[in-house]
Structure formats: structure tokens, C-alpha cells
Image (cartoon, helix red, strand yellow):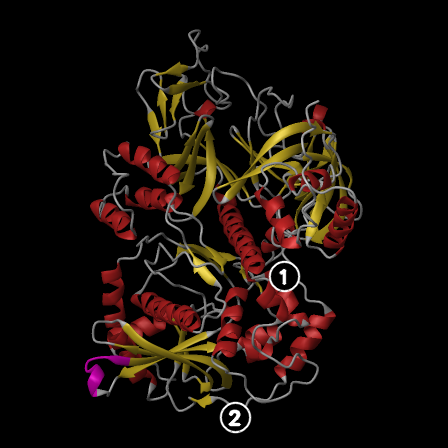
């Protein structure tokens, strides 16, 4: 008789680290059964595994997803329930139905949208819920639907508006704050809210039949200085501090500030150069020619940064709240600070004429602009002046000091420019990515109403401060590396091949070649930009290059900064508004023994890295990277809302515009000099059928009479400007009311020369789809 195959022997209970590694590396859902099988556990070991997994769940090391599958705490489960958040053309975006991870919820692209597939799901709309398998691809995630679930219970942020319903009956509607939402929702219950209020509502039903019930009144978003409330509510940005945090901030503000344990720099004419509308001031600079014969022609410089780590101690209430926020969020009408104003606009903010605690980075710059040495101290500073960029530039150009300045401020500015001349030359030799993209600035009057929207001017004074800050950030990273200390790097990885291929295809439409076989450096993109110098298409080229770049993030594993052409880079210069910088300060305190004497009452004793910091650098980096993306999206959306509010009085007028994107259903355009983003539907383009060329990103009429492409400038009629969502809608100046009547669809399929035929509704083969109600 043949012997039975030998059973695998138990290998003993795996460690927590082994279990976590298996969960993270597994392509599918991982439950207790999969873990036991992988580690060949039997009998008592399987019972012990159950207890271990319960402990890991209770302690927050792992979470449990639907189907009793485990995933790392704060991460995205391999199988989970998702809610459709937006539908953009043929692309569906979803977010976790419930998210308790660190940082904002991830946004996933849903695969196989809009047609029956193996899982049996059909076309998805905003608010639909699906059970899906998730997969990480590059820097993002995608979702593979497994099953569509019953809708209900999801909430939406919007504004209550009065309008008519079927048969002209007066009704109340909820207008979503997300410009990607496809419908207004009929309101079944307003609660105690009124027309015009910003509310959170719970939805029930599907599509146009969805009903909204108000569950929370947030306020009036159209009151002066209040449009930012929409983004704050939509993105769940914490904007109120708890009593414990505020009390700790008040105690911290009373900490003694003496020269003991600090370098006294109060005699130096250190100045801060910031935007005129700056809400906080966390950096200041000083430079002087180096008198050391060994560095003839060189400079000595100091970058003084607010010593936030002195006031925000690790593992305290302030620290926990700062980590939860990750960064300050800046809106045209307000700032949502990372720290209470007692600190952010008070004792931490570097203000002229007042003694302030600082972390000083001393730099030695040689005659070629190379930083040859650095050291860090805790210091006491008293700034000579807080100067706006525009004023600093004008004073330097005219060599004329402000009448209110001390006598040593103007010489200090001359020295700063002198040292910067060499720093700028060293930067040019390094050839970092040089994308000069305009930044919109919303100017409010004293009453909080929009006075002007303009492009923020880019001056040498901006570049000067930027180069001093970059030098200090590099010094901080290298100083910590020298001590083998933990570093929270600012990482920007090179572009992926997929994005470079897309850029290559796009550049073909400009008759511009782009070799994929070359070593890709920032200089490659700079040469491309230089080739379009003086060309009207330069903004489109720079935007395309920007789209090809990866997104920068924070983490403890150094991968360099591609855009700045630097091997080591950390954020050190803005600890008032960025948690990453605060961690770098704490690491410097530990590495260079910079603790200062004094026992703060009711505050943690140390100002170096705390226990939570040291154990979770990777997790914290992931969380604050997500929080930064949330802040950037909220800030951008709010500026779009202000643009829409500004343009609301110009509806019906002809405006100069530029095409920013082309899709099968139409093209998007922006108003020259103002920004904003609006759609021109394909139904408004003419009576001919149009073909969408994905590679060239163009919409071409059937007989070649008309073509619309990215970057094209044209006049458009503004038809709608919605401050709630920030959405604009345009049409061609000669478009008839109701749009053009399209020709019948082709009978020989929907493709022609690699292009997709597009009908009136903007879908292949004239397939109709439901558009927005509004």
C-alpha cells in the first residue's frame, strides 16, 4: 500500500510583522483561513491565531472589512464597499462607503463602467454602492466591481434652492457642491434649514428620483467671507479646536523665552519677506559677505524658522490635533490653521520688533553659489521688518528704503540679493524643472466681497526667498542623514513611463518629437519649454508637462526630488503650517542635542521626537500626504467658486476663453485671465457629427471644416456660473437655442481612422445618456 502523503507540520504562530506583510502582499482578500493556510497552522495554533488577530484588531493594528477580511489599519481593504462619488464622461470615481483610516479617503477609478460585465453590474451613477475588489496601481487605486448593492444612507453637501418641479410646481432642490454631480435632488424634508443654506443631506432612491432629507444645517455660504465653508464641509476639514487643545495652546504661549540655551541673534537685521496678505510668518532671512579668507567672494546666511517644536510638544493635545490636520488650509476668505491662532498668528509668528524663538540654519555659500557647510541652533531673534514681496522688490530696484524701516534694513536687503545672485546661478546649473504656471489671486474688499481676481505676479523677490528656503531644506535633510536620524523626506519621483508615453503622443499634435529612450531629467523638460518660448501654445505645453509628473509626497525612505533635481530634500521651513516640518525640527533637536532648559507646566517635557513619531514615520508620512492633497483640492475648488461668483453677473456675455480639455461629450474651457472651468457640450458645436481623436485630444467635424483642440483660443458665451459648485457652462456665440440638430448616426460603426464618432449626446455611435437636470 502506498504511503499517504506527509502532511505539512505546523511552523508555529507567525509574528505580527509576518501577518501584516502577508496581508499587504496578498492580491486578494485575506481572512483567518488564508492566514492559517499560508503559515500551515493546525489545531492549537489556529486557535492561538484567532486570539492574536482579535488582539491586533482591538489594538488598531488591523481592521476587518466586509466578509471578515483583514487589512492593515488605516489602509484600503482588498474587498470593500464603495460609493460612486462622480461620473466624468466614461470614467467613474468611487470612495469607500465608510472610511476610518488616517488621512482623507482614497479616490478609486472604477473599471468596466457603463456596460454589463462579468460581475453583472450595469451603468453606475453618483450615489450607487458596490462591493468591489481594490487594487493599487502606481500612486493610486482602482476598483473592480463585484456586486451592486442597495442604495440609501449616503449623504451629500449642497445648497438649498427654490425652483419648479414637474408641471411647474414650486419645489425645494438640493444643489450639490460637487461640480461633477449630475443632478439636483428634490428635498423631501428641509428640517430647520432655509433656502440658501449650506446643508448636509441624506439621500434615498436612485437617479432623478433620489430624495434628499436635510440632516445638518451648516450655514450661509454666500455671506461675506464664507464661500470656503462649502469646501470645509465637503472635505470634512476640521476647523474648530477642542477645549483641551485650546487650553494647552494657552499654556504653551506662556512658556518663558530667554537666551538660556539659545543663540542670541537679536542684534542681526533679520527680515521676513512674505505675501502682503500672509496670515502667519514662519521664516526670515539674513546674509552678509563672508570675511573668511578661505571663502573669498562667498557669503554667510541665516534662515531663521519659527521654533514651533518649543511650543508644540510631542504626544500632547496640540500635537495630536496638528497631526490630525496635517497642514493649514488657505482660502481667499479665511485660513483653517494647523495650530490655534494663539500660536499660529501669535507667539510662533515671526513679527518685527518682538522677541521670538527660532530654529536657525546657518549656511556658508561659496562664490559659485554652492552651500558648503551648515549648522543648526536654537536661537532668539528680533526681526527688523516684515516686508511684502512687492515692497521688497520695489525697494531693491529703486535702492530706496521705506520711511518706516530701521536704517539697517536696506543694507540687509542688498546683502540678501547679493548672496541670492550666486544661489540662483547654482540653481540654474542644477536645472530644476522650470514650470512658470500662473497662480490666481482672489482680492476681497473690506466687506468680504470680491474686488478683483488676478494672476499673482512672480517677482525676483519670490525666487530669492524660494532659493534660501530650498537651501535650508536641503541642509536639514543632509544634517539628519549625517546623524543617521529619521528624516521625513519630501519626495518627488520621476515620471512613469505610462505618463511619458502619453506626453509623447500629445506632443505629436504640435509636431514636436519626444524620445522615450533618453535619460529623463528636469533639463529635458526645460529644453522642451525653451523650444516654445514666445509661442502662444507655451501654457498648454507646461500644463501637459505638469500632468506628466508624479505627485510629491512625504515619507522616511529617500527617493530624491526629481522636480528640484536634488538627491536629499526635506521640508524644514514652515512648521506653523505643515506637520512634516515640525517632525524635521524635532529630529534636529534630538540629533544635535538642542533641548533648551525649562519645565513647562502641564506640557510634555521634551521637544524632540515623541514615541508616536518614532514608531510611525511611514504611517504619518502617508497620512499627511493625503491631508495635503485634500487641502490642495479644497483650496482649488474654493477659488473656482469665487471665480464663478465673480462671473455670475456676466452670464450671457461673450468672454475670451481657452480650451483646456477635450472629451467625447464636448470640450472644457477656461476664461482668460480668470480661470474657472466650464463645459461646451458637443450638442452646441454644430449640425455636423464630430469625431474624438484621443491621441491628439481633438474633436473634429465629419467634413473637416471645424476642429477643437487643447490650447485653442476662442470666444464663448457664458451661459451659467454656479458659485455653489464652481462650475461654468459655455456655448458658441452663434449656437441656436436648444443646440444644433445633429445628422443621423453612421451605420458603419463608430470608428473612423482611429477616431470615435460622436453624436449629439457626446457618446460613441450617438448612444443617448442622461445629462444634468440643471
Residue 412 visible in rendering? yes
The extreme front residue here reads 1
Q: Name the residue that disc number 1 marks.
A: 324
Q: Does residue 71 appear to the left or right of 405 in the view shown? A: right
- Is 294 within the magenta? yes
Residue 338 visible in rendering? no
Rendered position, 10 above or below 275: above
Rendered position, 633 above or below 706: below
Q: Residues within 10 Å of mark 1 (few under 14, many from 20)?
A: some
Where is residue 223? Give x, y as percent: 63, 56
Stretch of the chain drawn in magenta: 293-299
- Rendering quarter of residue 205: top right
Where is residue 214? Give x, y as percent: 76, 43
Which image quarter is the N terminus in?
A: top right
Q: Nearer the viewer, residue 101 or 251?
A: 101
Q: Name the residue that disc number 2 marks.
A: 260
Residue at image point 57% right, 89% down? 597
Q: Nearer the viewer, residue 248 or 532?
A: 248
- Is 370 within the magenta? no
Amino acid at each position: 500500500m502506498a504511503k499517504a502523503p506527509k502532511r505539512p507540520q505546523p511552523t508555529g504562530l507567525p509574528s505580527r510583522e509576518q501577518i501584516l506583510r502577508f496581508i499587504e502582499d496578498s492580491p486578494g482578500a485575506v481572512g483567518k483561513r488564508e492566514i492559517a493556510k499560508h503559515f500551515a497552522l493546525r489545531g492549537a495554533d489556529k486557535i492561538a491565531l484567532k486570539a492574536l488577530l482579535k488582539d491586533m484588531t482591538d489594538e488598531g493594528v488591523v481592521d476587518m472589512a466586509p466578509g471578515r477580511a483583514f487589512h492593515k489599519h488605516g489602509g484600503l481593504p482588498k474587498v470593500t464597499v464603495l460609493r460612486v462619488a462622480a461620473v466624468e464622461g466614461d470614467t467613474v470615481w468611487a470612495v469607500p462607503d465608510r472610511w476610518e483610516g488616517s488621512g482623507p479617503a482614497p479616490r478609486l477609478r472604477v473599471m468596466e463602467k457603463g456596460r454589463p460585465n462579468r460581475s453583472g453590474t450595469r451603468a453606475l451613477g453618483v450615489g450607487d454602492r458596490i462591493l468591489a475588489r481594490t487594487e493599487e496601481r502606481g500612486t493610486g487605486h482602482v476598483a473592480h466591481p463585484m456586486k451592486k448593492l442597495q442604495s440609501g444612507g449616503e449623504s451629500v453637501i449642497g445648497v438649498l434652492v427654490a425652483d419648479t418641479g414637474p408641471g411647474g410646481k414650486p419645489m425645494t432642490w438640493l444643489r450639490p457642491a460637487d461640480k461633477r454631480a449630475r443632478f439636483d435632488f428634490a428635498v423631501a424634508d428641509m428640517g430647520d434649514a432655509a433656502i440658501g443654506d449650506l446643508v448636509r443631506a441624506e439621500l434615498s432612491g436612485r437617479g432623478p428620483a433620489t430624495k434628499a432629507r436635510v440632516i445638518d444645517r451648516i450655514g450661509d455660504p454666500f455671506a461675506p467671507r464664507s464661500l470656503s465653508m462649502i469646501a470645509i464641509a465637503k472635505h470634512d476639514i476640521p476647523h474648530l479646536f477642542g477645549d483641551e487643545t485650546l487650553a494647552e495652546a494657552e499654556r504653551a504661549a506662556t512658556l518663558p523665552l530667554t537666551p538660556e540655551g539659545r543663540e542670541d541673534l537679536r542684534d542681526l537685521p533679520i527680515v521676513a519677506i512674505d505675501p502682503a496678505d500672509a496670515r502667519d510668518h514662519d521664516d526670515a532671512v539674513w546674509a552678509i559677505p563672508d570675511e573668511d579668507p578661505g571663502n573669498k567672494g562667498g557669503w554667510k546666511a541665516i534662515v531663521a524658522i519659527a521654533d514651533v517644536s518649543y511650543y508644540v510638544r510631542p504626544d500632547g493635545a496640540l500635537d495630536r490635533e496638528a497631526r490630525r490636520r496635517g497642514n493649514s488650509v488657505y482660502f481667499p476668505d479665511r485660513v483653517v490653521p494647523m495650530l490655534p491662532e494663539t500660536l499660529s498668528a501669535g507667539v510662533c509668528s515671526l513679527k518685527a520688533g518682538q522677541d521670538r524663538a527660532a530654529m536657525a540654519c546657518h549656511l556658508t555659500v561659496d562664490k559659485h553659489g554652492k552651500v558648503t557647510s551648515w549648522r543648526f541652533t536654537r536661537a532668539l531673534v528680533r526681526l527688523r521688518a516684515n516686508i511684502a514681496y512687492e515692497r521688497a522688490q520695489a525697494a531693491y530696484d529703486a535702492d530706496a528704503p521705506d520711511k518706516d524701516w530701521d536704517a539697517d534694513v536696506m543694507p540687509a536687503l542688498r546683502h540678501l540679493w547679493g548672496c541670492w545672485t550666486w544661489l540662483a546661478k547654482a540653481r540654474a546649473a542644477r536645472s530644476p524643472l522650470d514650470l512658470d504656471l500662473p497662480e490666481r489671486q482672489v482680492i476681497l474688499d473690506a466687506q468680504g466681497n470680491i474686488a478683483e481676481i488676478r494672476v499673482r505676479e512672480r517677482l525676483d523677490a519670490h525666487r530669492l526667498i524660494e532659493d534660501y528656503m530650498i537651501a535650508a531644506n536641503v541642509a536639514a535633510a543632509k544634517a539628519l542623514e549625517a546623524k543617521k536620524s529619521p528624516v521625513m523626506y519630501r519626495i518627488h519621483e520621476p515620471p512613469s513611463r505610462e505618463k511619458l508615453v502619453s506626453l509623447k503622443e500629445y506632443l505629436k499634435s504640435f509636431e514636436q518629437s519626444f524620445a522615450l529612450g533618453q535619460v529623463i531629467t528636469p533639463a529635458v523638460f526645460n529644453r522642451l519649454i525653451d523650444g516654445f518660448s514666445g509661442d502662444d501654445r507655451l501654457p498648454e505645453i507646461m500644463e501637459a508637462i505638469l500632468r506628466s509628473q508624479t505627485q510629491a509626497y512625504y515619507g522616511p525612505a529617500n527617493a530624491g526630488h526629481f522636480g528640484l533635481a536634488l538627491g536629499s530634500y526635506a521640508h524644514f521651513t514652515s512648521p506653523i503650517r505643515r506637520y512634516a516640518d515640525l517632525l524635521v525640527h524635532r529630529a534636529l533637536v534630538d540629533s544635535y542635542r538642542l533641548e533648551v532648559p525649562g519645565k513647562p507646566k502641564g506640557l510634555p517635557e521634551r521637544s524632540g521626537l515623541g514615541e508616536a513619531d518614532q514608531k510611525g514615520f511611514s504611517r504619518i508620512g502617508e497620512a499627511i500626504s493625503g491631508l495635503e492633497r485634500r487641502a490642495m483640492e479644497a483650496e482649488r475648488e474654493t477659488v473656482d467658486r469665487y471665480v464663478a461668483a465673480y462671473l455670475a453677473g456676466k452670464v450671457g456675455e461673450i468672454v475670451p476663453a481657452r480650451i483646456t480639455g477635450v472629451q467625447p461629450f464636448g470640450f472644457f474651457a477656461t476664461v482668460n485671465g480668470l480661470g474657472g472651468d466650464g463645459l461646451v457640450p458637443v450638442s452646441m458645436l454644430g449640425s455636423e457629427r464630430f469625431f474624438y481623436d484621443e491621441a491628439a485630444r481633438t474633436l473634429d467635424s465629419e467634413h473637416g471644416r471645424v476642429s477643437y483642440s487643447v490650447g485653442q483660443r476662442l470666444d464663448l458665451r457664458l451661459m451659467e456660473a454656479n458659485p455653489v459648485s464652481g462650475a461654468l457652462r459655455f456655448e458658441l456665440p452663434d449656437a441656436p437655442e436648444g443646440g444644433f440638430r445633429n445628422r443621423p448616426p453612421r451605420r458603419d460603426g463608430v470608428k473612423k481612422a482611429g477616431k470615435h464618432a460622436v453624436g449629439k449626446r457626446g457618446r460613441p455611435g450617438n448612444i443617448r445618456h442622461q445629462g444634468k437636470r440643471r
